[in-house]
Image: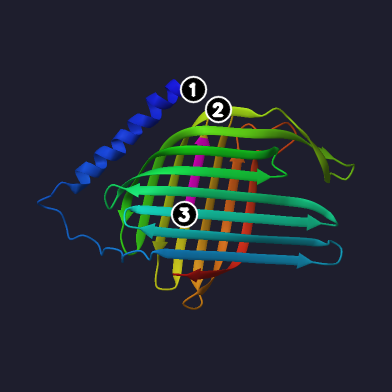
Amino acid sequence: MRLRIVKVVFPLLGLIASSAVLAQAPSPAAPAAPAAPAPPPPWLINAQAGYVSSKGNTNATTANVKLDVVHQYDVWKHELSLQYVYGTQNGYTNAERLDAMWQSNYNFSGRLYVFGQLVFDDDQFNGFEYQGTASAGLGYSIFKTAATMLNVQLGAGYSRMRPMTLIDDANGNVVGHTLLPVQDETVATTTIDFTHQFNAATKLLETLYVQSGDLDTLLKNDLGLQVSMSKSLSLTAGYEIRLNTNPPVGTERKDTLITLNLTYTRK
């Protein structure tokens, strides 16, 4: 596995670094550059929350909260991301997930950076008690204008996960679980971040994260459309897909989540 990562991932990292050097070379016939983005604020806090409750023939409750904190200082950028999802139906918990991510970037230039990343997922219904990964690599900003941002990251790291077998009752409600042995492996990681500002009030955001190893491949895609109501408040409609290619027996490979959240932003 380690040899495969060296043969596949690190040549790609070299291509990113080479493209950064070429991007800085002068071009005599280059067209006028698009408007440059404004300098980022030193602190950016983005908090989202959504809640749905239904009573009657079906008693169901669903809640989700997200928190993103970004701090930029000189050549450093630090980012913390947290998400919690909880759901019940007819007195049984049917969704409970906590996701956490920490990343630190060291910028070599306006586009090229090296990163270190920690990712932790705790989902009580996807067949894994937890999945945690530490990785590092190179990132490059392919597009970086006032309206559009596209970042690509490639890296390698170490993953640890604890599979489990869910125990259902006669009605299909999860009432317990049996833990399986811990699994460890080296993995290759890819992250793609895309943002596009259609106008002053509407923004599209998408983040794709792929973690691939011999035992399992984890894919997470988070798509959101944000519409501003004021300087600090907006509505965000989101669609998330999470996929494990080799989940424990008795669990689904794919989970989806649709959200409509009130979002608070502070700069």
Q: Secondary structure at mark 2?
A: strand
Whether residue 116 sits left or right of residue 142 in the image: it is right
201 displayed left or right of 185: left
Query: What residue type is disc 3 on?
Result: Glu
Q: CA distance from mark 2 to mark 1?
A: 8 Å
Residue pointed to by mark 3? 79
Q: Is residue 240 magenta?
A: no
Question: Which residue sits furthest right?
Answer: 170
Q: Alpha carbon of mark 1 to alpha carbon of mark 3: how far?
A: 29 Å
Residue under numbered circle 2: 185
Which secondary structure lies at badge 3? strand
- Does the magenta stretch mainly form a helix, a strand or a loop? strand
Q: Earlier in the sequence, mark 3 or mark 2?
A: 3
Most distant residue in the front direction: 73
Residue at disc 1, secondary structure:
loop
For the record, the magenta segment spans: 206-211
Residue at the location (47% across, 43% down)? 117
Report the side of 122 relative to 210 (left or right). right
Point out the frontmost of discs 1 and 3: 3
Rendered image: mark on residue 1: 1
Viewer-nearest of labels 3 and 2?
3
Q: Residue at x 43, y 51 (%)?
A: 193
Q: Earlier in the sequence, mark 1 or mark 3?
A: 1
Task: Give the residue type that dot 1 points to.
Answer: Met
Are the two marked residues, 2 and 1, in contact with CB atoms closer than 8 angstroms?
yes
Q: Is residue 251 above or below residue 197?
A: above
